[in-house]
Every structure is written in C-alpha cells, then in structure tokens.
Image (cartoon, coloured by chain):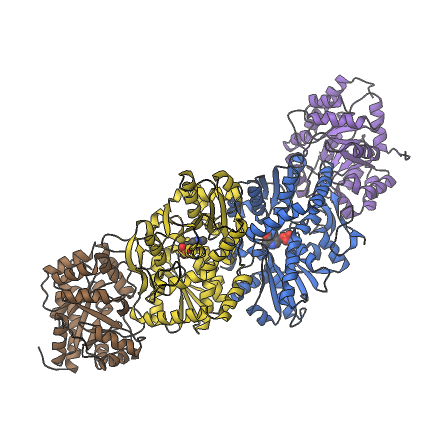
Chain colours: A blue, B purple, C yellow, D brown
C-alpha cells in the first residue's frame, strides 16, 4: 500500500495526498512542523494519549453525538435523511474534537502558549475552551471585521480567558487571521503551539486534524449501521470550508460504496471554481486572480469564508472519490428555515449548505427517491440567529 | 560534491565580498508608487551591492506590518508580477536584481515560465520565503536552467545538518533569517543574528547575508562582524511609506554603506 | 407506603406532597387536569410510550448527557465537583426532556394545539422545538418585557414555526405569561394541550414534569457510581426556579444519603423567603406581600424569575429532606466567570446559582474538604452572554 | 340529603326569584376609584338583586383584559382585602354583597379569619373561581360557620355527576360559567350558556346565575330564559374604566333590569 494513495489513509512522507499538501512554510517553521509530525504520530500511537482524548471527548464534549433520523423532512423529500449531530457537541460544533486533540498534544509537547485563528469564532471559542480546560495560555487571531461582526463570540473567548487579537491586515477576515497566526508562530515557535482549525495548513495539520475529526465519521458509520440494519448509507454529505467536518465524516465512509459529496458556498468554492496553488503552507485549490493573488471568499456563513480547501479534498476531487457541489446563499437560508420547521433543529449556516444541496439534488433527481443519506450537521445555528433575523427582516 | 554553476548575482556578490567589502542589499516593494524604479536606482547609486525587488502578494506571511502595508499599496495600484517584470526589463539598474515574493505567484505562472520571464527581465536571483528546501527542487532546477539564482533561507531554528544542506543548495547568497519573526524594524540586534551568520559562514563559501530586523547603520555593522553583509527591508520601506522618496532612500542606504565601509575599508570598487 | 409521603414517589390522590400541591384551577380546567392525570399515568405505564420517549431523548435530544468532573475548579476548592451536563442537551437545557414527554403525550391525547409560557425563552424554544418535531401547532405566551429583552429567542421560536404572543398584563414577565397561558387554556381546553415548563401548576403537572425530568437524576446517579467506584455523592446541588431541574436531579438521589440542596436567587427565593399560598393551581411557597398579593421575583437570570416554587420542593423543605439556599446576583456572576476560566464551560446564569452556593459554602466550611458533589448544570450560557457583556462592561 | 342552612344571600335571591323576578348581579371592582362605593350603591338602586364586589388580586387568572385592568388600577391605589372590608363595613347598601376574588387572599389571611371578617363587614357571600369544589371543604365549613354563602362554580366542561355535587354544595347561588373562557364581553350568547343553565336548574333549587360573557340587555334576557338570572361584569367595568361613573353604571344596570322585567313582569318588589 502506498500511503499517499490509500483511501483516506496517511499522506506520503512529504505530507502529500497525491500532488496536494506538502509543507510550504518559512524555514523557521519547518523544524516545528517536523517536530509536530513526530509528536502527533507518537501520541496517536500511544494508547494513553488516545484514552485520555477519548475520555475528554466522552465525558467533557459529549460524544458520541447522536444520529437523528429526520421524520418529516425525509418524507417530504422522499429520502431517508440522517443527521450526525455535531451541533450537540460542547461549544456547539465539531470544532471541539480537533482542539481537544491538539490541546492535549500541546501539553504533551510542553508548549504552554496555544494560538489559533478564527473566522466566525467557532474555532476560536473551541480553542479558548480547550485551553481553559487544560490550563494553557490562549491567543486567538481574528480579523477586525469579524471581531466587529461577532462581538459576542469575542466576549465568549475572553470569558474563557483567551486574548483576542484583532487582525488589521488584508481584508481583515479569516485568511488574514491565518496569516497573522502564522506570523506569530514564526516569531514564537519555540514556546507556542499553533492550533489550526481545519484540515488546512502545512503537513501534518491536514492529516492530523482529519484524524482528530474522524471520530465523527466512525461514530456515524456505526450508528448508520444500527439504523440501516447493517448497511451503509448510499450518500454521505458534508459542508466544506477548509473541510474538517467533511474530512472527518468522509474518513468513516471512504471505504464503503457511499457517494461522498462536499458542499461549498458559491462564493467560496475553492474546489469548484478554484485552481491549484500554494498558500498557507499547502498545495491545494484556491480562489485566485489571473496572477495568482488569493481572492476573498464571500458567503452567508463566516465559517465557510475561506478561499482555499484542505489538500485532501483537492485530492479526493482529483481522483473522483468525492464530488464537490456549491449552493447559493438563498438556498442556504431556505434550507435553514426548512430544517427548523420540520425537525425542530436550527442548524448552523455552514451545514445548512449541505442540506441545501440535498434538497436541490432531490428535486433535480440527482438524489434518487429512497436514497439513504448521512449528512453531518456540523454545528448549531444559535450563533447565526441574529444575522438571519436581519437577513429575513 | 556536485558541480555548482555560479550565476550573475552570486558572481557579483562574491566579487564584492572578496574585495573586502560588506554586502548591502536593500529591499524595495515593486509598484509601491509610480516612481518605484527611481528608488531602486537611488539605492543602487547609494552603494547597494544588489537590490531585492518585492513583488507584492496578497498573503505575505513572512512580512510584518510595514512591508504588508507597502504590498497593499502596490496591489491597489494594480501591480502584478507581469507588470513588475515588464518595468524591470525596461529599467536600467547597474546592480544585480533579485525578486523576493511568495511561491504561489511562481506556481501560478508555472516555475518554468516564471524562471524564463525573470531571466528575460534581467533578474538574476529569486527569494521565496515560503518555499523551503524540501519543496524547492523543481523550482531550483528551472531557475538554474534559466540562469536565475534561487536563494535559500536558513533560520535560527534550522538544525545543523539541514543548515548545511541549505547552504550548499542556495544560489546567489544564503539568506540567514536573523531572528524568529517576520520582517520589521527592531531596536536591538538579536543574538540569534550573529549566531546564525556564524553558523552559515562556517559551512559555506557562498556569501551569507543576514536579513529580518536590520534597522540602523550600527546594527548593520554589528551583524556584519559575523556575516558577509545585510539585507535591509522594513527600515527602508518605512521611510518610503513616509514619503521620503528616492532621495530619502538614497540617503538612508548611503548611511548604511558609509558605516560598513568605515568599519571595513577593504578595496574600494 | 402512603404515596403522599414516600420519598419523591407519587403525590397522594389529591395531588399533594404533604400539604403542598393540589389542583386549584377554575372549574373549567378541572376535568382537563383529571384527564391529563389519567392520560399521563397510562402513557407512563405504557412501554411503547416510554420507548418512543427514550428514543427521542437518545437520538434526538442527545441523552445521556455526560457527567464532567471538574479538574481545576475541584482542586482549587478542595472538593470533587461533578457536573451533570444538561447544557449539552438539544436546545441547550434540561427543558427539552420535559417538553418531549409532554408533546408526545399531547399527540397521544389527540390535542394538536400546544401552548406554553416562557420567561427567558428556554422553555418556549424547547416547546416550539418539540412541536415542530411532532407536527403540533405551537403558541407561546411571553411577557412583553421579556419579548423585548429576549428578541433572539422570540425569533428562534418563530423560526421553529411557533406563534409568540406578547403578554401585556401585570408586570409583563413570566408570572403573567403563565396567567395568560392559563386563560388561553380555560378558553380552549378541549383542543389544546398546555405544556407547563417546570414542576409547578395544578396536579398532575408538578409530578408529571418531575417524572419527565427524573432521567437527569437517574443518569447522574449511575454516572456518579462509575466515577465514585459504586458510591453516591455526598451532596447534590441544583438551581431552583420552578424547580424542574432540581426535582429531576433530586429524584435520582432522594433515596441515597446525599444531602440535597436547591439554590434560589436572593430576589426570588420562594422557599427561602416566601410563605405558603395558592397560586397557579398549586399550594406552595410564594413571595407575597402582607395581604397575599404575589410579588415579582427579580434576579439576574430570567429563568429563575419566578415568585413561587414547585410544591414538592416546598414539601422537601418542610420535611427537611432538602435544604434551600440563596445567592446574590454578584456571586452568580463570579461563579459564571470562574467556571468559564477553569473548565471551559459557560454555564447558563441559572445553574451558575448552584455553583455560586457551592463556592461560598466551601469557603464557609458548610461543604467539607473532599466532599463529592454532583451539581446539575441545567443549561448553557450562550443565551446569557450578551446580558453578561453589558453587566460586566 | 344533608341539612342545608340557607344564608342571607341565598335567602334574598331565592325570595326574589320566587317572586317571579329574574336575578341581576353586577360585578364591581372594589377600590377602582375613590367613589367605588357610590357605584355599588348606584347599581343596587338600579335594580341589582345583589352586588359582586371584586377584591383585586395580582394574578386574576379567570379574568379577561377589562377586569384585569380594573384590578391593576385598584391595586395601584393601594387597595387591600382589609381596606375593602373596612369600607364595606361602613357602606350602607340595601342589597346583599358577595365578594369575588382569588383563593390566595383568603388562604393568606386564613380561612377562619377571613370568613369572620367578611361576616363582620356585612358580606354575605363569596366567590373564589380558583377554588374548585375538591379543594373547597375547609373554606366552605368556615364560611358556613360565619354565615357567609360560599358560591361554587360550574363550567361547560363539568361532567354530570360532578355538576350535581357542585350544585348541591353551592350556597348563595350556583355560578354557571357561560362559556369556556375568562371574563369579558362577547358579541353573542354562547349556546353553552343556555346548556349549562338548563343542566344546573334541572338538578337544584338553588338559584342559578350565568356569568362570563353577559354583555347586553338582550343577551341577559336570552340567557335568563334558561337561568334564574345573570352576573354582569366586564360590560359594566368597561363603562367604569371609560369614566361613566355611578350614573353610567346605574343607567346600564337599569337597562338590564328593565329588559328583564319587561320579559318577566313577575311580582314587582
Ligand atoms: C459549524 C461549522 N461547520 C463547518 C465549518 C467549516 O469548517 P470545516 O470545513 O473545517 O468543517 C465551521 C467553521 O467555523 C463551522 O463553525
Ligand atoms: C438553564 C435553566 N436552568 C434552570 C431553569 C429554571 O427552571 P427549573 O427551576 O424548572 O429547573 C431554567 C428556566 O428557564 C433554565 O433555562
């Protein structure tokens, strides 16, 4: 088995999935990335680390999260829709799975400063949470524009003891927050652990974050088998910003016959409309202008406002194992409201993208009647309600 | 030991160094304003041994606020890699030019095409701080084929064996990052700058320049005790952002030149 | 065994716990209360109903919720503090346990209109959620003052398909919302199910709601036994508004040796400062003036702004099985912040009352060093963050 | 059958009914304004057979917006059960008075004390809409001991056996709630009002009055076809909230009286 091409196995030793991935960082960070790779592998292979992580996931973060069968919506659409409920995880999204893993790793590596970037604030809140729990100092970089839009999440991080640094470079949003976090890390790499929030960045992050998120897919697969009498779903769908919830989900189903579909926002479809490039430490697909300058992503959901995508998704798209679709903001708003009314669940706008595509694909016949679908509901909508209230009024 | 073709950038730098002179390489953001080429000419005239031409990129992760700001201004003016190279091709600068930018602009154009374009524009070196040696093979071979020196960087965190490998592979000069951090002015010379310079010079004949953090003539002198010279970026760019123009730039670079030459009178050119 | 006095068993046939409880409703509602009592008993004894409810609690609401051992806070206080994590239940509090039960019951009774009252909005959101899930029409009464204070929760309910009716009588808060819901019910009793949100109201509500909430205590007891090697905690603490999370919790521990402590807000300590009275269908303790007019409760947490308490709590206080303490708003704010910083958990302000008392009691020696404490964290603090931001700024 | 002591309220109502007259009982919120006793006197003078005196309560769950508003005004004026009884004791009204309020005010004072206070103030009946028969034993015995008629209510939802029990237990009169709902004016007579009246009258000799929803003289007449008369609350209180005062109240109650007497000339008093 060549690791590089096995179905959602390890990347090759250069940290590549096919031609994507790698470790394109300033020289100062190369040793840190290598150290992290080593430390992660050791930890991941260490039963003590795994059991400590599992215990936190279980008794602190609330895992396993349930799979909920949609009653009304399924019958309206003529499908069998099952939701993997990451909205019920502590802090309200799948982001906690990854940060608990990385925070434990940081402690194991003896790093007491824990930095993170955040867009909407979900990864920032999750990072601040894990840092508070494990007694790490936490600094979160957040674009100044997002700091203003998400004042409550900023305050939430502060309550958790984190320092939030408004980023004033570039467009002052997520992409720039990553840049500033990288700059911090370049300057502080000896004492600092950089906790990336998605399956992006230099190797080993895309691989490591996917491994920390694979619990989503592994749980879901088992749960689906109980619901489907030992069978797997026909279709597995997740939204894709950087792609961590999708990667974690897909990892549980990559070796089944299930179709895998990632759903991007129309204004941030790095896999759909982007081209290969090298940014934020990785070779992957990015939205770029004709010279190779990186463009801003724009979508209704701050968590998907990223102009790139994780390298493993670029690879899965290239080899055809997964397909990537995109939906408009208007479709997302409709899907959001529909789930609220039919199932009593307010999804985050991010996973509402996945649902929006399912609804459209069902109508267009791209999903057949009776198909059994597992969709990851990556987070809850509470964070978005104020914005939606404005949008709908 | 592999045969090493020495390109025009390295040739000039080696020659100047070997004449007993400390090397001074100012950094200028291309497209910063309409007259940015005059700045390049002014610093060349003021005693630069080569000039680093920053091609602005949307996501300059190795740069601090000053150079970021310059990049933003240049991009807002519509500066592109193509426009920069076109202008450089028509410019008439008497010292070697090395572009400094981020790898995506090269990858986007294609390494082969970009190497050829650089050469065609008269550029003799290129520095890509986010393309570490492990990822650089393809680019380096295209650059070498085009006669462009692919400069490699070492950092204070680079371990010994790796440092040796980078120093061997680097063409043009070895860019020794003087501290852990991004570009920007610093009040003091970091001890790490002296250490990294010493480490590099102990393993290579290629000129070793220290960059990142070099701010004053005095610092340039201190650092050059251990290195073959310095790269100066933010300290110059801040003056340009303040509107000091070619004269200010020339005066500042001149003051660095003078300080270095006072300390190392060497063989005047 | 006389049902009336068994430790958290059934009330007597008049619906009384000792001298508290009863069914003090307008004659129009008496038959409805009797019908509900019958229907609840039948359902509760019906394994099909119980398994349908358990299935919803499990695969929809996310039960069992974990018990989290506090690491840092425990060692700071010199105790062993375990939190029952109702904040991780769907909709963010224990309220969902009760409404799922009542909504299933409403369906079983053939009532398609589902009304509820709400203060802060938690019970309203939970009710709207259950109604959406089960296809019931939902109307929520909410004091006009609270409608303005909790605009986001109002919108949340509307997104879930509920109609929110602003109540303009009295002080326009929770007490008045209950009055108006009762008035609606008086007029619509034949078609309408009234879903009360706490262990208050006429029999069988206090008993029924406690039974629907006892899952909290029963799970917690089992979980504590795993943590404590087969032993029970020394102390069990919960906040008390109407008292549903406390009643559900206490029900799991009433027959152990654990001390049971309910914590009320200073400005709404119906058990602490109130006297016996008859309001909202029950005989219990209420804050009253010298004539017997009911006073407004005031506290930092809207969910505890109720001038009464469930009759079973009045009874537990009277017989000494549980004790009731109160804490100030300032202590609550401190406890809220402390839990955020030490454990990465933002509690709702309601359960922050329970924690505030634990902190004070530890300092005052009323809790001994080394005591093992189970506290119910009845809900998450997201709903309160905006208010706290204002209060702390 | 138990021996049943007939109190002064029921005695008067029975007498009037037996004289062929339909009973008219207006509701007045005590303490609504300074001159509220004048209103009581005015409605008595206009032909009321008894007057219901509402003691305002903070949480009047059986009352619609009009009577709620009256209660709020009265409470804001500092009205308390004690102040109401003190004023009633000094009032000089020629018809029987029955208080209507919520059980907590009685429970708070204590049933015994309250029954005695009512009697001392000259009140001969009491209506507690949130004290259903199952919970009323203690209060009823204290009331009976004090010579106060404890009026019980029946509702459209009350099943047959229970209705019989309530009608038997009720003293003063049987308060038949005419519809499912709280106090308030209604455009039409609910069929439920006629049904409930018929059901009660078929099982009891005690006068049966229909309350809740009785709004116009015509409605009073329609309902009285099946009942011994009506209780009128919100329709009167709305006029008082509008500032119509004792005259307006007298005129309105007079118009009801007239309509009833036109239809049932009976034995004029
Ligand atoms: C709820 C939720 N879903 C999805 C995402 C997107 O991240 P990813 O694509 O890494 O899953 C975010 C990011 O903030 C999120 O908050
Ligand atoms: C989180 C939370 N805890 C507690 C309460 C108080 O209710 P109870 O005393 O019935 O548990 C509420 C009420 O809204 C609540 O939202």
**Ligand 2: image quarter:** bottom left
Please report the residue visible at 64 percent of the width from the left and 48 percent of the height from the top: A51
In this rendering, the answer to whether C37 lies above or below B129 is below
Q: Position of residue B26 (x, y in %)?
A: 73, 30
- Location of residue D146 by image quarter: bottom left
- Location of residue B140 by image quarter: top right
- Please name whichever residue, D242 or D47, is drawn nearer the observer in this view of the structure: D47
In this rendering, the answer to whether B50 lies above or below A311 is above
Q: Is residue A328 visible?
A: no
Q: Position of residue B93 (x, y in %)?
A: 79, 32
In screen coordinates, is A197 left or right of B7?
Answer: left
In screen coordinates, is A102 left or right of B106?
Answer: left
In this rendering, the answer to whether C158 lies above or below B69 is below
Number of marks in the rendered image = 0
In screen coordinates, is B115 left or right of A196?
Answer: right
* Quadrant assignment for the N terminus of chain C: bottom left
Please report the residue visible at 31 percent of the width from the left and 77 percent of the height from the top: D159
Q: Is residue C153 visible?
A: yes
Q: Position of residue A49 (x, y in %)?
A: 65, 45
């Amino acid at each position: 088995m060549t690791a590089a091409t096995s179905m959602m196995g390890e990347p090759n030793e250069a940290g590549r999935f096919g031609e994507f991935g790698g470790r394109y960082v300033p020289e100062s960070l190369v040793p840190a990335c290598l150290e992290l790779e080593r430390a992660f592998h050791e930890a991941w292979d260490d039963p003590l680390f795994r059991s400590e992580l599992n215990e936190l996931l279980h008794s602190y973060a609330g895992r396993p999260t349930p799979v909920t069968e949609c009653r009304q919506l399924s019958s309206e659409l003529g499908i069998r829709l099952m939701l993997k409920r990451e909205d019920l995880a502590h802090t309200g999204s799948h982001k906690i799975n990854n940060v608990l893993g990385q925070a434990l790793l940081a402690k194991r590596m003896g790093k007491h400063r824990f930095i993170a970037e955040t867009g909407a604030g979900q990864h920032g809140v999750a990072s601040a949470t894990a840092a508070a729990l494990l007694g790490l100092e936490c600094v979160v970089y957040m674009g100044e524009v997002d700091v203003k839009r998400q004042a409550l999440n900023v305050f939430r991080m502060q309550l958790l003891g984190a320092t939030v640094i408004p980023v004033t470079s570039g467009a002052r949003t997520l992409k720039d927050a990553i840049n500033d976090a990288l700059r911090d890390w370049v300057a502080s790499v000896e004492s600092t652990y950089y906790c990336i929030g998605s399956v992006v960045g230099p190797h080993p992050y895309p691989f490591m974050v996917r491994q920390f998120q694979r619990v989503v897919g592994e749980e879901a697969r088992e749960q689906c088998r109980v619901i489907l009498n030992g069978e797997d779903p026909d279709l597995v769908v997740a939204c894709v910003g950087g792609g961590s919830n999708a990667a974690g989900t897909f990892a549980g189903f990559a070796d089944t016959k299930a179709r895998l579909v990632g759903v991007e926002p129309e204004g941030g479809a790095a896999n759909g409309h982007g081209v290969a490039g090298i940014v934020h430490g990785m070779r992957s697909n990015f939205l770029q202008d004709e010279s190779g300058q990186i463009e801003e992503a724009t979508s209704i959901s701050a968590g998907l406002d990223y102009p790139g995508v994780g390298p493993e998704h670029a690879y899965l798209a290239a080899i055809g194992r997964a397909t990537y679709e995109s939906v408009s903001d208007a479709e997302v708003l409709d899907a959001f409201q529909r789930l609220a009314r039919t199932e009593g669940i307010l999804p985050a706008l991010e996973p509402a993208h996945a649902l929006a595509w399912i609804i459209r694909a069902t109508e267009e016949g791209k999903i057949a009647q009776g198909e059994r679908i597992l969709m990851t509901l990556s987070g809850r909508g509470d964070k978005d309600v104020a914005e939606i209230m404005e949008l709908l009024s | 030991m592999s045969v090493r073709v020495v390109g025009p950038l390295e040739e000039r730098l080696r020659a100047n160094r070997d004449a007993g002179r400390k090397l001074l390489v100012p950094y200028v953001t291309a497209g910063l304003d309409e007259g940015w080429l005059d700045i390049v000419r002014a610093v060349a005239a003021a005693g630069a041994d080569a000039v680093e031409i920053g091609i602005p990129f949307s996501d300059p992760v190795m740069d601090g606020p000053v150079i970021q700001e310059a990049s933003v201004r240049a991009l807002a003016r519509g500066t592109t890699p193509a426009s920069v190279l076109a202008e450089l091709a028509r410019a008439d600068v008497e010292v070697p030019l090395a572009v400094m930018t981020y790898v995506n602009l090269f990858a986007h154009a294609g390494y082969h095409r970009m190497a050829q374009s650089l050469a065609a524009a008269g550029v003799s070196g290129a520095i890509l701080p986010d393309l570490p040696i492990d990822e650089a093979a393809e680019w380096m071979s295209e650059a070498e084929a085009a006669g462009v020196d692919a400069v490699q960087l070492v950092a204070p965190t680079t371990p010994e064996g790796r440092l040796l490998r980078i120093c061997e592979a680097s063409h043009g000069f070895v860019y020794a990052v003087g501290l852990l951090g991004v570009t920007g002015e610093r009040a003091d010379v970091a001890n790490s700058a002296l250490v990294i310079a010493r480490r590099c010079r102990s393993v290579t004949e290629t000129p070793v320049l220290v960059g990142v953090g070099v701010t004053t003539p005095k610092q340039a002198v201190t650092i050059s005790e251990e290195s073959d010279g310095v790269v100066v970026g933010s300290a110059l760019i801040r003056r340009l952002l303040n509107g000091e123009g070619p004269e200010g730039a020339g005066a500042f670079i001149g003051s660095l030149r003078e300080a270095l030459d006072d300390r190392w009178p060497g063989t005047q050119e």
